[in-house]
Amino acid sequence: MLVALLTHVFGIECELEALEPITRSEVRDLLPDRRRREELIDLMVAMELVCNPIPIQLSEAVDEWATDLGVDEVGVQVARELARGEVARATADFLRSTYTSTANAQNTDFIRLFDRYGERAINFTVEEDPRLADRFRSLEHCAAGSLGRELWQFYTDRQFLFPGEVGAANLALAHHDWGHVIYGYGTTGIGEVEAAAFRAASSDFRGVGLQFFGDLMFYQSALLSSLVTGSHPRGEMDVPDAECRVAEAIRRGRVCTLDPYAPGFDFFDHVDEDLERLRLLWNVVPPVIGSDCSCVTCRSDSATT
């Protein structure tokens, strides 16, 4: 994974074992920008969360790096709790900080729904909302190739209920479905991780990065169960080119100009616009994977097929 990230995201090919060690104080001097420090710690946490169990020595080492670089992130806290076997506490800390929890907090009716229906209200429609359901169903009448029609097709092809129908995604969770359509990722385990990686790289909202960590725990290490899709077998994202696919999703997200979690942004403002035109507008570049990619991992996989 580290080799794929260096190649796809930074264009660097190297042997990790040949690199000279570097101290935390040296890194602190080299990275004065807080955002760059956060990205480094995020990378460490991601590598930590694909392990099951998480070695306590690894968790403590990441804690030390985060402390010395002045990064106080929920992801570090969740990984620390999981390394100690505190699954319930880690789950609670994870849920309260994801993008769905933040979106729900802006819903004045959410507390009532949560009190009545419990955790299911975090991600699902628990009371019928005909107006919202009709708004999503009406996307069928958008022009072919438009963002709206493609989202309607996304739901229809998978036989998903429309938000507003009891049992469907609620509005907070449904927000991420637009990304699946725009970025071009499916809803398999690896597809969910790719979409989460893209979102995390393209948004300034830290809760989106935490969701990427969540998908790694759901679909790779099986450290946590998803409130949406339940428990998954360990290693579900072990598919050909998986490391490069996730790294490429991060690269694509970093150059994308769309932050779907920016205040005031609404996908419904763009439903009648052509999807390919929007991809050009937002710089959603095509993925480069497999035979089209020159990185070591992709070259090796291509040579064996």
Image: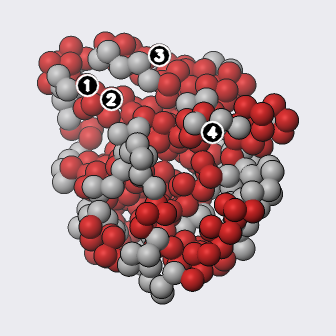
Left or right: residue 33 versus residue 49 is left
Q: Earlier in the sequence, mark 4 or mark 3?
A: 3
- Determine whether 161 is above or below 232 in the image: below
Q: Residue at x 62, y 52 (%)?
A: 171
Question: Of helix, strand and loop, which one carries label 3?
Answer: helix
User: The disc labelled 4 sits on which kind of residue?
Assistant: Asn
Q: Are marks 4 and 1 in contact (CB under 8 Å)?
A: no
**Residue wearing tag 1:** 34
- Determine whether 232 is above or below 45 in the image: below
Q: Position of residue 183 (x, y in %)?
A: 42, 65
Q: Earlier in the sequence, mark 3 or mark 1?
A: 1
For residue 60, the mark is 3
Of 50 and 94, the residue lying toward us: 94
User: The disc labelled 2 sits on which kind of residue?
Assistant: Glu
Of badges 2 and 4, nearer the viewer stands 4
Query: In whole angstroms, how far apart are the C-alphas of marks 2 and 3?
Result: 17 Å
For residue 38, the mark is 2
> Does residue 228 appear in this view?
no
Query: In whole angstroms, how far apart are the C-alphas of marks 4 and 1?
Result: 31 Å
Task: Spot the residue most to the right.
Answer: 116
Question: Of helix, strand and loop, which one carries label 2?
Answer: helix
Left or right: residue 61 versus residue 120 is left
Of badges 2 and 3, nearer the viewer stands 2
Query: In whole angstroms, how far apart are the C-alphas of marks 2 and 4?
Result: 29 Å
Q: Residue at x 26, y 67 (%)?
A: 281
* Residue 248: quadrant of the picture: bottom left
**Residue wearing tag 4:** 107
Of badges 3 and 1, nearer the viewer stands 1
Q: Position of residue 42 (x, y in %)?
A: 39, 33
* Residue 7: quadrant of the picture: bottom left
* Residue 167: quadrant of the picture: bottom right
Q: Are marks 1 and 2 in contact (CB under 8 Å)?
A: yes
